[in-house]
């Protein structure tokens, strides 16, 4: 299955608990944001900075959780799979900037098309998570695991979940 | 791409076709060794033309030449693989094959010029050779937490500059150089690693340590 949907923690409350800014738009969350009990435990995926650079170059403004001085280490998993960051998209951002959300995902998909050049198609696998708010104020995690070419299908899935 | 790079591209294309005749186990060992030397000279030529493009700040040509340099490197490594196999050294042969696979990948990442070329089928061939010539391998895959990583292009903290992993900039591919490891979390045994050089090389049959490639008894410490 390409998508796995599950409950997620209240992002706003959790950000407050950890002493971070509340992400209001689109943001890259640390891998273990939902289970960490302190800032010191948090880790980003090694691909987080790459996505940040790509977004910055293409005018996607992230309302980052952490400040410049908050150094969150990264986890380097040396498998062939590309493990992407956890992308938080607030309900407001999704409703007002759906084109930007599509663009944000397109930018990653385009990068991956180049990144996986020279690797047989059957070996190309990515994992990435999206966190979105539903209409009733709950938070859901949408995990995508599959070929990079189908990443764009996440856009519809995110919109479907947020309308629940 | 500048004129010199275009002329060189034609040369590489011809050499690629010519070299493909040498990429078989039946071909004479000395001829394969000689071909490797010829290709090394061609690779030096590519590096020289690339350095000229870099001097002129011609990024497109520099990246195209990096792509050509990498594909020549792949051919050299494949030839070396055949030579190593004939010299009864499959462990070395494996490393050459993996180098050839990585070099082909870099060639395809560095520039679009090989996107619709023989390089795609060459790439598939290298993966097929892996399956046909060597027994299935298991690999070590470390997972660690890093505090600091640098950009290989400009040396600044990765993520602060505008370079991204896997893209070519002025004849060089960008990668993240890990400078500080905070913690090693685990080492897993996987079938699809990021680095195929991190291989399990011996196993125990209860009595002896055996080489995974040759099934010969391993010498202690090797």
Image (cartoon, grey):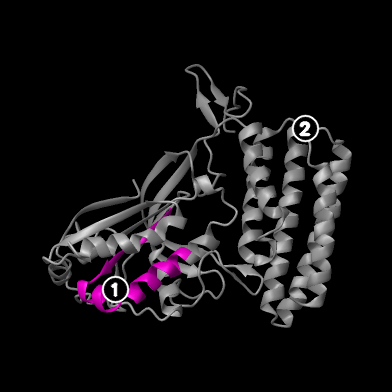
Local SS, label 2: helix
Q: Position of residue B176 (x, y in %)?
A: 50, 64
User: Which image quadrant is residue A65 in?
Assistant: bottom left
The answer to whether one can see residue A42 in this image is: no
Quadrant location of the C terminus of chain A?
bottom left
- The one nearer the camera, B143 or A7, is A7
Q: Where is residue B79 in the image (x, y as percent from the top left)?
A: 77, 44
Residue most toward the top? B207
Q: Where is residue A33 in the image (x, y as percent from the top left)?
A: 23, 61
Q: Please say whether residue B117 is one of the residues in the magenta stretch.
A: no
Q: Which of marks 2 and 1 is in front?
A: 1
User: Measured along the vertical axis of the image, is residue A80 above or below residue B150?
Assistant: above
Left or right: B43, with A62 as reference point: right
Local SS, label 1: strand
Q: Mark 1 lies on which chain?
A: A
Q: Residue at x 24, y 58 (%)?
A: A141
Q: What stretch is highlighted in magenta?
A: A82-109
Give the residue at mark 1: A26
- The one nearer the camera, A148 or A40, is A148
Give the residue at mark 2: B86
- The one nearer the camera, B133 or B77, is B133
Q: Which residue is drawn at 72% across and 41% down?
A: B81
The answer to whether one can see residue A96 in this image is: yes
Chief secondary structure of the magenta portion: helix
Q: Which chain carries label 2?
A: B
> In this rendering, do the residues under marks 2 and 1 share a single chain?
no
């Amino acid at each position: 299955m390409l998508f796995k949907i599950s409950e997620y923690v209240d992002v706003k409350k959790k950000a407050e608990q950890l002493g971070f800014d509340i992400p209001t738009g689109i943001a890259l969350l640390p891998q273990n944001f939902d289970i960490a009990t302190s800032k010191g435990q948090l880790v980003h995926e090694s691909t987080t900075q790459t996505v940040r650079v790509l977004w910055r170059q293409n005018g996607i403004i992230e309302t980052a959780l952490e400040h410049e001085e908050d150094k969150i280490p990264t986890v380097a998993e040396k498998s062939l799979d590309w493990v992407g960051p956890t992308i938080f998209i607030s309900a407001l951002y999704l409703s007002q900037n759906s084109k930007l959300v599509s663009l944000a995902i397109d930018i990653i998909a385009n990068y991956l098309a180049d990144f996986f050049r020279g690797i047989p198609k059957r070996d190309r696998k990515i994992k990435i998570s999206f966190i979105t708010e539903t209409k009733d104020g709950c938070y859901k995690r949408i995990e995508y695991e599959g070929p990079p070419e189908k990443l764009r299908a996440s856009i519809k899935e995110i919109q479907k979940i947020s309308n629940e | 791409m500048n004129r010199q790079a275009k002329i060189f591209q034609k040369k590489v294309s011809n050499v690629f076709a010519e070299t493909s005749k040498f990429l078989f186990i039946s071909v004479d060992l000395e001829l394969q060794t000689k071909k490797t030397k010829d290709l090394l000279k061609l690779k030096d030529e590519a590096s020289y033309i690339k350095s000229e493009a870099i001097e002129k700040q011609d990024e497109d040509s520099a990246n195209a030449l990096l792509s050509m340099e990498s594909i020549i490197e792949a051919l050299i490594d494949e030839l070396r693989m055949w030579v190593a196999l004939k010299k009864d050294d499959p462990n070395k042969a494996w490393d050459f094959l993996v180098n050839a696979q990585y070099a082909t990948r870099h060639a395809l990442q560095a520039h679009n010029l090989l996107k619709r070329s023989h390089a795609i089928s060459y790439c598939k061939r290298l993966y097929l050779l892996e399956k046909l010539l060597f027994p299935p391998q298991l690999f070590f895959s470390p997972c660690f937490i890093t505090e600091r990583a640098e950009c290989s292009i400009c040396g600044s903290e990765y993520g602060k500059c505008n370079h991204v992993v896997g893209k070519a900039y002025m004849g060089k591919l960008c990668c993240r150089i890990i400078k500080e490891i905070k913690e090693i979390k685990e080492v897993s045994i996987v079938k699809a690693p990021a680095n195929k050089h991190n291989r399990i090389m011996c196993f125990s049959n209860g009595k002896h340590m055996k080489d995974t490639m040759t099934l010969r008894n391993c010498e202690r410490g090797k």
